[in-house]
Image: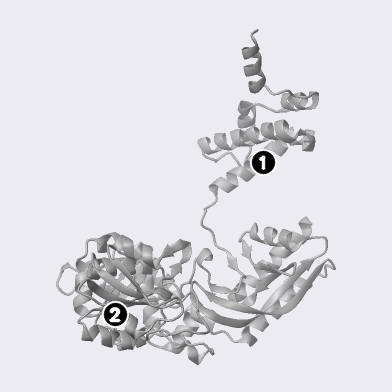
Amino acid sequence: MTPETTMTDSKKKPDLNAAQQLLLKKLPGVDHVLETAKQDPELRNTPRTLLTDSVRQVVDRLRKSILEDHQKMHETDFTDADILKKIKRVVKSAMSLNLTRTINATGIVVHTNLGRSLLAKEALDQIQIISARYSNLEYNLATGKRGLRYTAVEDIVCELTGAEAAMVVNNNAAAVLLCLDTIARHREVVVSRGELVEIGGSFRIPDVMEKSGAILKEVGTTNRTHLKDYKHAINDETGLLLKVHTSNYGIVGFTSAVALKELVELGEQHHLPVMEDLGSGTLIDFSKYSPLREPTVKESVNTGADIVTFSGDKLLGGPQAGIILGNRNVIAKIRQNPLTRALRIDKLTLAALESTLRLYRDEEKAIHAIPTLNMLTASIDEIKKKALKLKELLEQPGDERLSATLIDAGSRAGGGSLPLFELPSKCVGLSISKMTASVIEKTMRENDPPIIGRIEDDIFLMDMRTVAADELTEIANAIQTCLKGS
Protein backbone atom coordinates (compact mmCIF):
# COMPACT_ATOMS: atom_id res chain seq x y z
CA MET A 1 0.00 0.00 0.00
CA THR A 2 1.40 3.38 -1.01
CA PRO A 3 1.65 6.30 1.46
CA GLU A 4 -0.94 8.17 -0.63
CA THR A 5 -3.43 5.32 -0.27
CA THR A 6 -2.87 5.16 3.48
CA MET A 7 -3.59 8.89 3.80
CA THR A 8 -6.80 8.60 1.78
CA ASP A 9 -8.05 5.66 3.82
CA SER A 10 -7.36 7.47 7.08
CA LYS A 11 -9.57 10.31 5.95
CA LYS A 12 -12.41 8.02 4.95
CA LYS A 13 -12.20 5.84 8.03
CA PRO A 14 -11.46 7.80 11.21
CA ASP A 15 -9.99 5.88 14.11
CA LEU A 16 -12.73 4.46 16.30
CA ASN A 17 -12.26 3.30 19.85
CA ALA A 18 -13.71 0.06 21.16
CA ALA A 19 -16.75 1.76 22.69
CA GLN A 20 -17.65 3.45 19.41
CA GLN A 21 -17.24 0.23 17.46
CA LEU A 22 -19.51 -1.58 19.91
CA LEU A 23 -22.18 1.12 19.66
CA LEU A 24 -22.05 1.10 15.87
CA LYS A 25 -22.66 -2.66 15.92
CA LYS A 26 -25.74 -2.09 18.10
CA LEU A 27 -27.10 0.49 15.68
CA PRO A 28 -29.91 -1.21 13.69
CA GLY A 29 -30.09 -0.91 9.94
CA VAL A 30 -32.57 1.34 8.16
CA ASP A 31 -34.50 -1.61 6.68
CA HIS A 32 -35.02 -3.21 10.10
CA VAL A 33 -36.18 0.06 11.67
CA LEU A 34 -38.49 0.78 8.73
CA GLU A 35 -40.19 -2.61 8.99
CA THR A 36 -40.61 -2.14 12.76
CA ALA A 37 -42.07 1.34 12.21
CA LYS A 38 -44.60 0.06 9.69
CA GLN A 39 -46.06 -2.23 12.36
CA ASP A 40 -46.58 0.58 14.88
CA PRO A 41 -50.26 1.68 14.98
CA GLU A 42 -49.28 5.37 15.31
CA LEU A 43 -47.05 5.25 12.24
CA ARG A 44 -49.03 2.82 10.07
CA ASN A 45 -50.81 5.57 8.09
CA THR A 46 -47.76 7.78 7.66
CA PRO A 47 -46.94 8.42 3.96
CA ARG A 48 -44.25 5.93 2.92
CA THR A 49 -41.73 8.49 1.67
CA LEU A 50 -42.05 10.55 4.86
CA LEU A 51 -41.66 7.48 7.07
CA THR A 52 -38.59 6.33 5.15
CA ASP A 53 -36.99 9.80 5.34
CA SER A 54 -37.76 10.01 9.07
CA VAL A 55 -36.20 6.60 9.75
CA ARG A 56 -33.05 7.52 7.85
CA GLN A 57 -32.87 10.84 9.66
CA VAL A 58 -33.08 9.19 13.10
CA VAL A 59 -30.53 6.47 12.25
CA ASP A 60 -28.14 9.05 10.76
CA ARG A 61 -28.42 11.21 13.90
CA LEU A 62 -27.61 8.22 16.10
CA ARG A 63 -24.60 7.34 13.94
CA LYS A 64 -23.38 10.94 14.07
CA SER A 65 -23.76 11.00 17.87
CA ILE A 66 -21.65 7.82 18.16
CA LEU A 67 -18.89 9.32 16.04
CA GLU A 68 -18.90 12.76 17.68
CA ASP A 69 -20.02 12.32 21.30
CA HIS A 70 -20.38 8.60 22.07
CA GLN A 71 -19.82 9.06 25.84
CA LYS A 72 -23.31 10.51 26.20
CA MET A 73 -24.89 7.52 24.46
CA HIS A 74 -26.67 4.73 26.34
CA GLU A 75 -27.70 1.22 25.34
CA THR A 76 -31.35 2.25 25.64
CA ASP A 77 -30.78 4.69 22.77
CA PHE A 78 -30.69 1.69 20.42
CA THR A 79 -33.82 -0.18 21.48
CA ASP A 80 -36.68 -0.40 19.02
CA ALA A 81 -38.95 1.40 21.48
CA ASP A 82 -36.61 4.37 21.91
CA ILE A 83 -35.91 4.65 18.21
CA LEU A 84 -39.63 4.56 17.45
CA LYS A 85 -40.17 7.44 19.90
CA LYS A 86 -37.59 9.48 18.03
CA ILE A 87 -39.19 8.62 14.68
CA LYS A 88 -42.63 9.65 15.95
CA ARG A 89 -41.26 13.04 17.02
CA VAL A 90 -39.70 13.57 13.59
CA VAL A 91 -42.90 12.49 11.81
CA LYS A 92 -45.06 14.71 14.04
CA SER A 93 -42.83 17.70 13.33
CA ALA A 94 -42.91 17.03 9.58
CA MET A 95 -46.70 16.58 9.54
CA SER A 96 -47.36 19.73 11.57
CA LEU A 97 -48.19 22.98 9.79
CA ASN A 98 -45.33 25.49 9.82
CA LEU A 99 -47.64 28.46 10.34
CA THR A 100 -49.18 28.00 13.75
CA ARG A 101 -51.15 29.98 16.29
CA THR A 102 -49.21 31.61 19.14
CA ILE A 103 -50.12 33.34 22.40
CA ASN A 104 -48.72 36.86 22.40
CA ALA A 105 -47.64 37.74 25.95
CA THR A 106 -45.05 40.32 24.85
CA GLY A 107 -47.27 43.38 25.34
CA ILE A 108 -46.58 44.48 21.75
CA VAL A 109 -50.04 44.86 20.20
CA VAL A 110 -49.19 45.03 16.50
CA HIS A 111 -46.36 42.48 16.64
CA THR A 112 -44.93 42.12 13.13
CA ASN A 113 -43.18 38.82 13.91
CA LEU A 114 -46.40 37.36 15.36
CA GLY A 115 -48.71 38.35 12.50
CA ARG A 116 -49.53 42.00 13.25
CA SER A 117 -53.21 42.83 13.72
CA LEU A 118 -55.82 40.25 14.73
CA LEU A 119 -58.98 40.35 12.66
CA ALA A 120 -62.43 41.15 13.99
CA LYS A 121 -65.04 38.37 14.05
CA GLU A 122 -66.99 40.16 11.32
CA ALA A 123 -63.94 40.03 9.04
CA LEU A 124 -63.36 36.33 9.78
CA ASP A 125 -66.99 35.50 9.04
CA GLN A 126 -66.86 37.32 5.71
CA ILE A 127 -63.61 35.57 4.72
CA GLN A 128 -65.28 32.21 5.28
CA ILE A 129 -68.31 33.17 3.19
CA ILE A 130 -66.30 34.59 0.29
CA SER A 131 -63.71 31.79 0.27
CA ALA A 132 -66.32 29.02 0.26
CA ARG A 133 -68.47 30.38 -2.57
CA TYR A 134 -68.17 32.34 -5.81
CA SER A 135 -68.33 36.12 -5.49
CA ASN A 136 -68.70 39.28 -7.58
CA LEU A 137 -64.96 40.02 -7.22
CA GLU A 138 -64.66 41.55 -10.68
CA TYR A 139 -68.27 41.39 -11.84
CA ASN A 140 -70.58 44.39 -11.90
CA LEU A 141 -73.96 43.13 -10.76
CA ALA A 142 -75.70 46.31 -11.99
CA THR A 143 -74.46 46.11 -15.59
CA GLY A 144 -73.77 42.39 -15.91
CA LYS A 145 -70.28 43.20 -17.19
CA ARG A 146 -66.75 43.01 -15.86
CA GLY A 147 -66.08 45.30 -12.93
CA LEU A 148 -63.18 46.46 -10.75
CA ARG A 149 -62.25 44.62 -7.57
CA TYR A 150 -61.43 47.94 -5.88
CA THR A 151 -65.10 48.93 -5.86
CA ALA A 152 -65.63 46.49 -2.98
CA VAL A 153 -63.87 48.91 -0.64
CA GLU A 154 -63.64 52.23 -2.48
CA ASP A 155 -67.00 53.60 -1.36
CA ILE A 156 -66.46 52.85 2.32
CA VAL A 157 -62.87 54.19 2.27
CA CYS A 158 -64.04 57.44 0.69
CA GLU A 159 -66.95 57.69 3.12
CA LEU A 160 -64.67 57.34 6.16
CA THR A 161 -61.86 59.60 4.94
CA GLY A 162 -63.49 62.16 2.65
CA ALA A 163 -61.26 61.15 -0.27
CA GLU A 164 -62.45 61.44 -3.88
CA ALA A 165 -61.21 57.97 -4.89
CA ALA A 166 -59.36 54.99 -3.47
CA MET A 167 -57.76 51.68 -4.36
CA VAL A 168 -55.90 48.94 -2.50
CA VAL A 169 -52.73 46.93 -3.13
CA ASN A 170 -50.99 44.21 -1.14
CA ASN A 171 -49.10 46.40 1.38
CA ASN A 172 -48.06 49.99 2.01
CA ALA A 173 -44.57 49.56 0.55
CA ALA A 174 -46.26 48.44 -2.67
CA ALA A 175 -48.61 51.43 -2.46
CA VAL A 176 -45.68 53.84 -2.21
CA LEU A 177 -43.81 52.09 -5.02
CA LEU A 178 -46.83 52.17 -7.33
CA CYS A 179 -47.60 55.84 -6.64
CA LEU A 180 -44.01 56.97 -7.20
CA ASP A 181 -43.72 54.91 -10.39
CA THR A 182 -46.95 56.43 -11.73
CA ILE A 183 -46.52 60.05 -10.69
CA ALA A 184 -42.77 60.69 -10.72
CA ARG A 185 -40.92 58.12 -12.79
CA HIS A 186 -37.66 59.69 -14.10
CA ARG A 187 -38.48 62.88 -12.21
CA GLU A 188 -37.26 64.31 -8.91
CA VAL A 189 -39.15 63.68 -5.68
CA VAL A 190 -38.43 66.23 -2.95
CA VAL A 191 -38.44 64.78 0.57
CA SER A 192 -36.99 65.83 3.92
CA ARG A 193 -33.79 64.06 4.96
CA GLY A 194 -35.36 63.44 8.37
CA GLU A 195 -38.17 61.45 6.75
CA LEU A 196 -36.10 58.89 4.82
CA VAL A 197 -37.35 56.10 7.04
CA GLU A 198 -36.45 52.43 7.14
CA ILE A 199 -39.31 50.05 7.85
CA GLY A 200 -39.18 46.40 8.97
CA GLY A 201 -36.96 44.02 7.02
CA SER A 202 -34.51 46.81 6.06
CA PHE A 203 -36.82 48.31 3.41
CA ARG A 204 -35.93 51.97 3.00
CA ILE A 205 -37.75 54.86 1.34
CA PRO A 206 -34.69 55.70 -0.83
CA ASP A 207 -34.54 52.08 -2.06
CA VAL A 208 -38.27 51.98 -2.84
CA MET A 209 -37.90 55.30 -4.65
CA GLU A 210 -34.96 54.04 -6.71
CA LYS A 211 -36.87 50.91 -7.71
CA SER A 212 -39.82 53.06 -8.82
CA GLY A 213 -37.62 55.03 -11.21
CA ALA A 214 -38.09 58.28 -9.32
CA ILE A 215 -35.08 60.46 -8.44
CA LEU A 216 -34.53 61.26 -4.77
CA LYS A 217 -34.00 64.92 -3.91
CA GLU A 218 -33.15 65.26 -0.21
CA VAL A 219 -33.68 68.57 1.55
CA GLY A 220 -33.00 69.88 5.05
CA THR A 221 -31.14 68.02 7.75
CA THR A 222 -31.90 65.03 9.95
CA ASN A 223 -33.51 67.11 12.68
CA ARG A 224 -34.58 70.33 10.94
CA THR A 225 -36.23 70.98 7.58
CA HIS A 226 -37.89 74.27 6.61
CA LEU A 227 -40.33 75.28 3.87
CA LYS A 228 -37.57 77.25 2.16
CA ASP A 229 -35.62 74.00 1.73
CA TYR A 230 -38.45 72.62 -0.41
CA LYS A 231 -38.78 75.90 -2.33
CA HIS A 232 -35.09 75.97 -3.24
CA ALA A 233 -35.21 72.34 -4.40
CA ILE A 234 -38.07 72.81 -6.88
CA ASN A 235 -37.02 73.01 -10.53
CA ASP A 236 -38.15 71.88 -13.98
CA GLU A 237 -37.28 68.26 -13.11
CA THR A 238 -39.44 68.15 -9.98
CA GLY A 239 -42.33 65.68 -10.22
CA LEU A 240 -43.60 65.34 -6.65
CA LEU A 241 -43.39 66.71 -3.13
CA LEU A 242 -43.36 63.80 -0.68
CA LYS A 243 -43.99 63.79 3.06
CA VAL A 244 -43.31 60.61 5.03
CA HIS A 245 -44.83 60.32 8.48
CA THR A 246 -42.21 59.06 10.93
CA SER A 247 -44.57 56.47 12.39
CA ASN A 248 -41.85 54.11 13.64
CA TYR A 249 -39.50 56.58 15.38
CA GLY A 250 -39.43 60.06 16.83
CA ILE A 251 -36.93 62.92 16.84
CA VAL A 252 -36.99 65.10 19.91
CA GLY A 253 -35.06 68.22 20.98
CA PHE A 254 -33.98 70.88 18.49
CA THR A 255 -36.31 69.92 15.64
CA SER A 256 -38.36 71.49 12.88
CA ALA A 257 -40.57 69.94 10.21
CA VAL A 258 -42.86 71.30 7.50
CA ALA A 259 -46.54 70.57 8.05
CA LEU A 260 -48.44 68.79 5.30
CA LYS A 261 -50.76 71.80 4.88
CA GLU A 262 -47.77 74.06 4.08
CA LEU A 263 -46.45 71.50 1.62
CA VAL A 264 -49.82 71.31 -0.14
CA GLU A 265 -49.93 75.11 -0.47
CA LEU A 266 -46.42 75.06 -1.94
CA GLY A 267 -47.43 72.33 -4.36
CA GLU A 268 -50.42 74.36 -5.53
CA GLN A 269 -48.20 77.38 -6.17
CA HIS A 270 -45.91 75.31 -8.42
CA HIS A 271 -48.58 72.99 -9.86
CA LEU A 272 -46.93 69.96 -8.26
CA PRO A 273 -48.72 66.97 -6.72
CA VAL A 274 -48.18 66.30 -3.01
CA MET A 275 -48.16 62.84 -1.48
CA GLU A 276 -48.07 61.70 2.14
CA ASP A 277 -47.02 58.22 3.21
CA LEU A 278 -48.69 57.85 6.61
CA GLY A 279 -47.21 54.41 7.23
CA SER A 280 -49.44 53.04 9.99
CA GLY A 281 -52.47 55.21 9.37
CA THR A 282 -55.40 55.51 11.77
CA LEU A 283 -59.07 56.32 11.30
CA ILE A 284 -59.68 57.26 14.94
CA ASP A 285 -58.21 60.05 17.05
CA PHE A 286 -56.12 58.28 19.69
CA SER A 287 -55.77 61.48 21.71
CA LYS A 288 -59.23 60.68 23.13
CA TYR A 289 -57.75 57.62 24.81
CA SER A 290 -54.11 58.54 25.43
CA PRO A 291 -51.82 61.56 25.90
CA LEU A 292 -50.16 61.05 22.53
CA ARG A 293 -51.42 62.45 19.22
CA GLU A 294 -51.28 60.55 15.93
CA PRO A 295 -52.51 62.20 12.69
CA THR A 296 -55.61 60.57 11.24
CA VAL A 297 -56.07 59.67 7.58
CA LYS A 298 -59.02 62.05 7.32
CA GLU A 299 -56.90 64.97 8.52
CA SER A 300 -54.32 64.27 5.82
CA VAL A 301 -57.01 64.10 3.15
CA ASN A 302 -58.56 67.36 4.40
CA THR A 303 -55.29 69.23 3.89
CA GLY A 304 -55.69 68.68 0.16
CA ALA A 305 -52.89 66.15 -0.37
CA ASP A 306 -53.24 64.55 -3.80
CA ILE A 307 -52.31 61.06 -2.57
CA VAL A 308 -52.25 59.49 0.90
CA THR A 309 -51.08 55.92 1.56
CA PHE A 310 -51.21 53.79 4.70
CA SER A 311 -51.24 50.18 5.94
CA GLY A 312 -54.27 48.01 6.54
CA ASP A 313 -52.81 45.71 9.19
CA LYS A 314 -51.37 48.19 11.67
CA LEU A 315 -53.44 50.78 13.56
CA LEU A 316 -56.36 50.13 11.24
CA GLY A 317 -56.60 46.59 12.65
CA GLY A 318 -57.37 44.86 9.35
CA PRO A 319 -55.57 42.50 6.94
CA GLN A 320 -52.26 43.23 5.23
CA ALA A 321 -52.97 45.84 2.58
CA GLY A 322 -51.72 49.15 1.22
CA ILE A 323 -54.51 51.70 0.90
CA ILE A 324 -54.14 54.51 -1.66
CA LEU A 325 -56.59 57.40 -1.66
CA GLY A 326 -56.88 60.97 -2.82
CA ASN A 327 -57.37 62.89 -6.07
CA ARG A 328 -59.69 61.11 -8.53
CA ASN A 329 -57.55 61.87 -11.60
CA VAL A 330 -54.34 60.68 -9.97
CA ILE A 331 -55.96 57.48 -8.71
CA ALA A 332 -57.22 56.81 -12.26
CA LYS A 333 -53.63 57.02 -13.57
CA ILE A 334 -52.38 54.70 -10.84
CA ARG A 335 -55.02 52.11 -11.77
CA GLN A 336 -53.73 52.11 -15.35
CA ASN A 337 -50.16 51.35 -14.28
CA PRO A 338 -49.18 47.77 -15.33
CA LEU A 339 -47.65 47.29 -11.86
CA THR A 340 -51.13 47.48 -10.37
CA ARG A 341 -51.94 43.93 -11.47
CA ALA A 342 -48.73 42.58 -9.97
CA LEU A 343 -49.45 44.29 -6.64
CA ARG A 344 -53.19 43.69 -6.39
CA ILE A 345 -54.79 42.01 -3.38
CA ASP A 346 -56.86 38.84 -3.40
CA LYS A 347 -60.56 38.33 -2.62
CA LEU A 348 -59.95 37.18 0.97
CA THR A 349 -58.03 40.36 1.81
CA LEU A 350 -60.77 42.46 0.24
CA ALA A 351 -63.42 40.59 2.22
CA ALA A 352 -61.59 41.15 5.51
CA LEU A 353 -60.75 44.78 4.72
CA GLU A 354 -64.29 45.74 3.74
CA SER A 355 -65.73 44.16 6.90
CA THR A 356 -63.15 45.91 9.07
CA LEU A 357 -63.75 49.31 7.47
CA ARG A 358 -67.52 49.05 7.87
CA LEU A 359 -67.06 48.71 11.64
CA TYR A 360 -65.58 52.23 11.69
CA ARG A 361 -68.97 53.76 10.94
CA ASP A 362 -69.53 53.45 14.69
CA GLU A 363 -66.30 54.29 16.55
CA GLU A 364 -67.46 52.75 19.82
CA LYS A 365 -68.37 49.53 18.04
CA ALA A 366 -65.04 49.54 16.17
CA ILE A 367 -63.06 49.84 19.41
CA HIS A 368 -65.01 46.96 20.91
CA ALA A 369 -64.94 44.67 17.84
CA ILE A 370 -61.48 45.27 16.33
CA PRO A 371 -58.89 43.48 18.51
CA THR A 372 -56.08 45.94 17.79
CA LEU A 373 -58.16 48.94 18.87
CA ASN A 374 -59.54 47.03 21.84
CA MET A 375 -56.05 46.19 23.12
CA LEU A 376 -54.67 49.67 22.50
CA THR A 377 -57.49 51.34 24.41
CA ALA A 378 -57.91 48.75 27.20
CA SER A 379 -57.94 50.26 30.69
CA ILE A 380 -55.37 49.31 33.30
CA ASP A 381 -58.21 47.87 35.43
CA GLU A 382 -59.21 45.45 32.67
CA ILE A 383 -55.62 44.33 32.26
CA LYS A 384 -55.13 43.95 36.01
CA LYS A 385 -58.16 41.63 36.23
CA LYS A 386 -56.55 39.26 33.72
CA ALA A 387 -53.24 39.42 35.57
CA LEU A 388 -54.89 38.55 38.90
CA LYS A 389 -56.81 35.69 37.29
CA LEU A 390 -53.66 34.18 35.79
CA LYS A 391 -51.80 34.55 39.09
CA GLU A 392 -54.64 32.73 40.83
CA LEU A 393 -54.61 29.90 38.25
CA LEU A 394 -50.84 29.50 38.63
CA GLU A 395 -50.98 29.35 42.42
CA GLN A 396 -53.93 26.95 42.69
CA PRO A 397 -51.88 23.72 42.50
CA GLY A 398 -49.79 24.96 45.45
CA ASP A 399 -46.39 24.11 43.98
CA GLU A 400 -43.83 25.84 46.23
CA ARG A 401 -41.25 25.95 43.45
CA LEU A 402 -43.31 28.50 41.54
CA SER A 403 -43.46 32.21 42.29
CA ALA A 404 -45.93 34.45 40.41
CA THR A 405 -45.94 38.21 40.97
CA LEU A 406 -47.79 41.17 39.47
CA ILE A 407 -45.44 43.68 37.89
CA ASP A 408 -46.15 47.15 36.49
CA ALA A 409 -44.83 47.43 32.95
CA GLY A 410 -45.19 49.30 29.70
CA SER A 411 -46.73 47.88 26.53
CA ARG A 412 -46.10 49.10 22.98
CA ALA A 413 -48.34 49.64 19.99
CA GLY A 414 -45.74 47.96 17.76
CA GLY A 415 -45.74 47.54 13.99
CA GLY A 416 -43.94 50.84 13.54
CA SER A 417 -46.80 52.71 15.23
CA LEU A 418 -46.83 55.30 18.03
CA PRO A 419 -43.08 54.93 18.74
CA LEU A 420 -42.99 57.38 21.67
CA PHE A 421 -46.07 56.03 23.40
CA GLU A 422 -45.77 53.51 26.23
CA LEU A 423 -49.07 52.03 27.39
CA PRO A 424 -49.26 51.30 31.14
CA SER A 425 -49.82 47.59 31.67
CA LYS A 426 -49.67 44.68 34.11
CA CYS A 427 -47.42 41.66 33.73
CA VAL A 428 -47.35 38.35 35.55
CA GLY A 429 -43.73 37.64 36.45
CA LEU A 430 -42.86 33.96 36.69
CA SER A 431 -39.96 32.36 38.56
CA ILE A 432 -39.38 28.64 39.13
CA SER A 433 -36.73 27.45 41.57
CA LYS A 434 -33.72 25.75 39.96
CA MET A 435 -34.90 26.92 36.53
CA THR A 436 -33.54 30.02 34.81
CA ALA A 437 -35.78 32.52 33.05
CA SER A 438 -34.23 31.52 29.72
CA VAL A 439 -35.20 27.88 30.30
CA ILE A 440 -38.77 28.91 31.17
CA GLU A 441 -38.90 31.12 28.07
CA LYS A 442 -37.70 28.25 25.86
CA THR A 443 -40.19 25.82 27.40
CA MET A 444 -43.06 28.24 26.87
CA ARG A 445 -41.93 28.89 23.30
CA GLU A 446 -41.94 25.13 22.61
CA ASN A 447 -45.43 24.68 24.06
CA ASP A 448 -48.44 23.92 21.85
CA PRO A 449 -49.52 26.64 21.27
CA PRO A 450 -46.24 28.55 21.75
CA ILE A 451 -46.40 31.24 24.44
CA ILE A 452 -44.19 34.22 23.62
CA GLY A 453 -43.20 36.45 26.54
CA ARG A 454 -40.11 38.41 27.51
CA ILE A 455 -37.34 38.28 30.11
CA GLU A 456 -36.44 41.10 32.48
CA ASP A 457 -34.12 40.78 35.51
CA ASP A 458 -34.10 36.98 35.13
CA ILE A 459 -37.90 36.83 35.42
CA PHE A 460 -40.16 35.53 32.65
CA LEU A 461 -42.80 38.23 32.05
CA MET A 462 -46.21 37.81 30.44
CA ASP A 463 -47.91 41.10 29.58
CA MET A 464 -51.67 40.78 29.94
CA ARG A 465 -52.54 43.57 27.51
CA THR A 466 -52.02 41.25 24.54
CA VAL A 467 -53.28 38.02 26.16
CA ALA A 468 -56.92 37.12 25.57
CA ALA A 469 -59.06 36.08 28.55
CA ASP A 470 -59.63 32.61 27.05
CA GLU A 471 -55.86 32.05 26.81
CA LEU A 472 -55.21 32.28 30.56
CA THR A 473 -56.06 28.63 31.23
CA GLU A 474 -53.82 27.52 28.36
CA ILE A 475 -50.92 29.46 29.87
CA ALA A 476 -51.56 27.95 33.31
CA ASN A 477 -51.65 24.43 31.84
CA ALA A 478 -48.40 25.04 29.96
CA ILE A 479 -46.67 26.16 33.14
CA GLN A 480 -47.93 23.08 35.00
CA THR A 481 -46.45 20.93 32.22
CA CYS A 482 -43.20 22.86 32.63
CA LEU A 483 -43.19 22.14 36.38
CA LYS A 484 -43.82 18.43 35.85
CA GLY A 485 -40.87 18.21 33.49
CA SER A 486 -38.47 20.08 35.75
Q: Which residue is mark 2?
A: 232
Determine whether, in the image, residue 202 is placed left or right of residue 397: left
Residue 466 location, quadrant: bottom right
- Residue density around tag 2, few if under 14, some if 14–19, many if 20 or more, within 10 Å: few
Q: Quadrant of residue 211?
A: bottom left
Quadrant location of the N terminus in the rendered image:
top right
The location of residue 183, given as percent across then percent down, is: 23, 71
Q: Identify the element where label 2 is drawn.
A: helix
Image side of residue 135 versus residue 32, left or right? left
Observer-nearest of 308 and 1: 1
Is residue 396 in sight in this rendering? no
Q: Is residue 188 above or below residue 357?
A: above
Q: Is residue 238 above or below residue 53?
A: below
Label 1 crowd bin: few (<14), some (14–19), many (20+), radius 10 Å: some
Q: Nearer the viewer, mark 1 or mark 2?
A: 2
Q: Between disc 1 and disc 2, whose residue precedes?
A: 1
Q: Is residue 420 visible?
A: yes
Seen in the picture, residue 357 relative to 99 is either above or below; the reply is below
Q: Amino acid at mark 2?
A: His
Q: Amino acid at mark 1?
A: Lys
155 w.r.t. 13: above or below: below
Residue occupying the point 33% across, 65% down: 209
Residue identified by numbered label 1? 86
Label 1: element kind:
helix
Viewer-side residue, 90 vs 71: 71
Name the quarter where the C terminus is drawn.
bottom right
Q: Quadrant of residue 242?
A: bottom left
